[in-house]
Amino acid sequence: MAVRLTNQRIEILIYLKGNFTHPTAEEVYLGVRKKLPRISRATVYQNLKFLSDKGFILEVDVKGVSRFEPVIGPHHHLICRVCGKIMDFESKELTDYAMKIVKKINDFDIKSTNSNFYGECKKRCGGK
Amino acid sequence: MAVRLTNQRIEILIYLKGNFTHPTAEEVYLGVRKKLPRISRATVYQNLKFLSDKGFILEVDVKGVSRFEPVIGPHHHLICRVCGKIMDFESKELTDYAMKIVKKINDFDIKSTNSNFYGECKKRCGGK
DNA sequence: GTACGTGCAAATGATTTGCGTTAAG
DNA sequence: CTTAACGCAAATCATTTGCACGTAC
């Protein structure tokens, strides 16, 4: 029941802290492995799930693959349907407006105000 | 180059038409198989991709799995982080407002105004 | 008749799980 | 010490691909 603070967890958090490139689990694995060469993918997956359950990091689904980002203030995502690239943008206006509207809906308790917008990078990103 | 109208495509479209339960590819496969018992998963996957590329249906990513819905007007999704359930809701207000704000951002060309909001069903949905 | 589409089976890629071992508290 | 967490390998799940055959046009 006690939550242990292991090197693996610490390094994964350090890797993600201030990293807004939205890495996949595989990218986190490759990155953290530079510090901890013996870490396994299973550990990375387990901890990414653990850390998002605990609310330390955020998971974003794009094209069937989970990507991760540190938790910062509420923000939104522009997601390119072609290359899968994620751009963050902030808009308190939009956040407040969306919250106001969505709060009217019963049966749903908004936990995060992140919203995702789908479209295409203008400089045609030439596929993934 | 010619696009062929096959029974498989027709049945998949019929299955999805007016179906707002956001079925997965597997669910579409099981549903369409009642009409076409010999259809294969590969065909279902290929056609779901084909139909979304053509804009006949819409794909939504939830918890790493693709789900599909017929194309209707712009609308938004409330997605439960716990059980993965998707609720549709319409709000022209929100669509217009979001479009207005996001249009200011360069390098990004909005194709669809669908946006996803994450949270939790109020009646704690007891896992998937 | 000619590709485009299909069905099947095998391949791939992401993620999960079982299990014996290691190490945090 | 005790047991959560790890590392490894195998398993699972969603999705994709290669290929010979079928069929829409």
Image: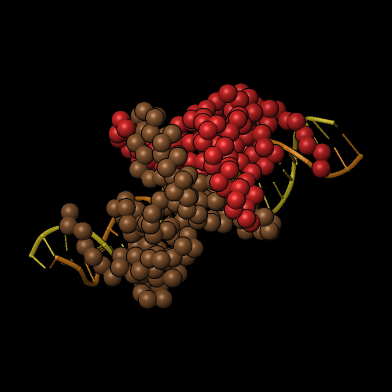
Chain colours: A brown, B red, C orange, D yellow
The quarter of the displayed image where residue A4 is located: bottom left
Query: Residue B40: x and y, percent?
Result: 61, 36
Q: Is residue B25 left or right of residue A30?
A: right
Residue drawn at 62 percent across, 55 percent down:
B106
Q: Is residue A2 left or right of residue B17?
A: left
Q: Quick check: can you spot residue B84?
A: no
Name the quadrant of the N terminus of chain A. bottom left
**Foreground residue among B61 and B90:** B90
Whether A76 is drawn above or below B30: the answer is below
The quarter of the displayed image where residue A69 is located: bottom left
**Foreground residue among C9 and D3:** D3
Residue drawn at 66 percent across, 34 percent down:
B56
Residue drawn at 46 percent across, 45 percent down:
A93
The mark tally for this picture is 0
Whether B43 is drawn above or below A122: the answer is above
Query: Residue A92: x and y, percent?
Result: 44, 48
Query: Residue B1: x and y, percent?
Result: 81, 43
Query: Residue A38: x and y, percent?
Result: 36, 73
**Foreground residue among B48 and B118:** B118
Name the quadrant of the C terminus of chain A. bottom right
